Amino acid sequence: MSLADYQSVEETRSRLSAYAKTGIAGLVGVGLGLAATYVATFGALPFGAAHSGPWTSWPKAGAADADPYARAIIARQATAPLGNGEGLAFVAATDDAGRPLDGSCEYRIAGSPPVARLWTINLFTPEGHLLAPGPGRRSLSSDQILRSAKGDFEIVVAPSARAGNWLSTPNGAPFAISLNLYDTNVSPTQTSLEGLKLLSIARGDCL
Amino acid sequence: MTPRLRGPIVLPWALGALFLAGIVHISSVLLMPRFAQNDAYVRLGGQTRGTVALPDPSVAQSMPFQDQRAEYSVCHYDLDLGAARVRSEVTPDALVAISFHDRTGRIFYSTTDRAALRGRIDVRLLTPRQLDSVEASDPEDQAPQELRLTPPTSTGFVLVRALIEQPGGRAAARQAANAVMCSTERE
């Protein structure tokens, strides 16, 4: 093999390796980008969350100026969020102390929710699906709640039946609580939710 | 010599890959509403005509976090077939909330029966061209009786929530959700 031949082989080799590197970098780039999109749109909305105790709301999700991530998640998860003109929706996946809600524990929901024409409480899986069928109710609205003479109330979330306002959980399964305020005077802007006292979720005994 | 060179040479390739990853991520997020195969528009029945009742959400869910204390109806619109009209008389038995979604599920307008004018909800969905021709034939001395909206996309859906209130209960809510009438005004 002459020196010229050797140089041309080396040249071909380095060119091939450049193609290979470009290909690998391209594949890695596309893969990373798609993986980031998958992760970012899998769970809860990444931006625009407003917090109040254990409750989280995404007021922008129900507005025309929802951010691109919210729009992608709404499309991918096929949700239809509550519009800002309808009310405001909150979700809690933990108790007041930040512990994930557990179907084998008892929780007491109490407090005075903001003024609304009607509000509802629903139990779901953490992903927002229906819990496995069981005895008892999985949802309550404000006009069904039994109140004390003073007007306050307590909702007990527990796997076994209770007197009064009882919501049933499937024993042992994780769950989430949604609170929907319909025709509320709470303005759906993040600043007004700061300091807003929603219902407290206190954990009691666990089985 | 070659092994010494190889180390630092990886860095530009890695930076290139990261840059590409950023572009792919941003464009896929932006394009997802357009290309999502199984979004709310499709899952709620796609091209339905008129008002369609959704199943009792405490038994069969049509979408995540659907309120079990409500009855739902949906109607899809296609402005290419003509302007769409959503009408309902307000009943005292149930709280009715309506959200107007474009093709990607984004809400461009939402309201409850409390905001209804003269005891009725009356909304007309029009393309800008349809709006022009409707406004051209409006009487000069009279304000329009209905709310006119131009959706961002020519297709989309209207979601009706009728909240269960006592004493009417679920039956009254179902009736209120069914009472929202959607129609297409053929040109």
Image: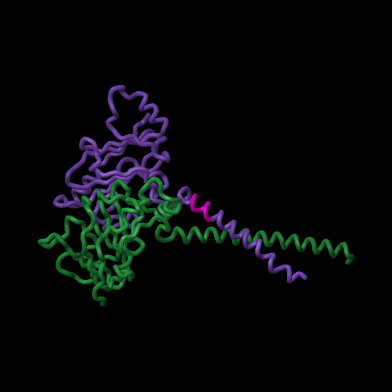
The main secondary structure of the magenta stretch is helix
Q: Identify which residue is drawn at 67% across, 65% down.
A: B10
Rendered-image quadrant of the N terminus of chain B: bottom right
Q: At which x and y percent is residue A105?
A: 26, 73
Q: Which residues are magenta?
A: B25-31
Most extreme residue toward the right is: A2
**Quarter of the rendering containing residue A56:** bottom left
Q: Identify which residue is drawn at 49% across, 50% down.
A: B30
Chain identifier, colour green: A
Q: Identify which residue is drawn at 31% across, 64% down.
A: A54
Q: In the rendered view, how is the structure colored?
A: by chain
- Left or right of A44 on screen, residue B54: left
* Residue B74 showing in the rendered view: no
- Left or right of A108 on screen, residue A99: right
Location of residue A162 with respect to A122 vertically, above or below: below
Q: At which x and y percent is residue B123?
A: 30, 37
Residue placed most toward the observer, B168 or A100:
A100
Most extreme residue toward the left is: A149
Rendered-image quadrant of the C terminus of chain B: top left
Q: At which x and y percent is residue A156?
A: 21, 67
**Quarter of the rendering containing residue A153:** bottom left
* Residue A115 showing in the rendered view: yes
**Quarter of the rendering containing residue B9:** bottom right
- Left or right of A72 on screen, residue A187: left
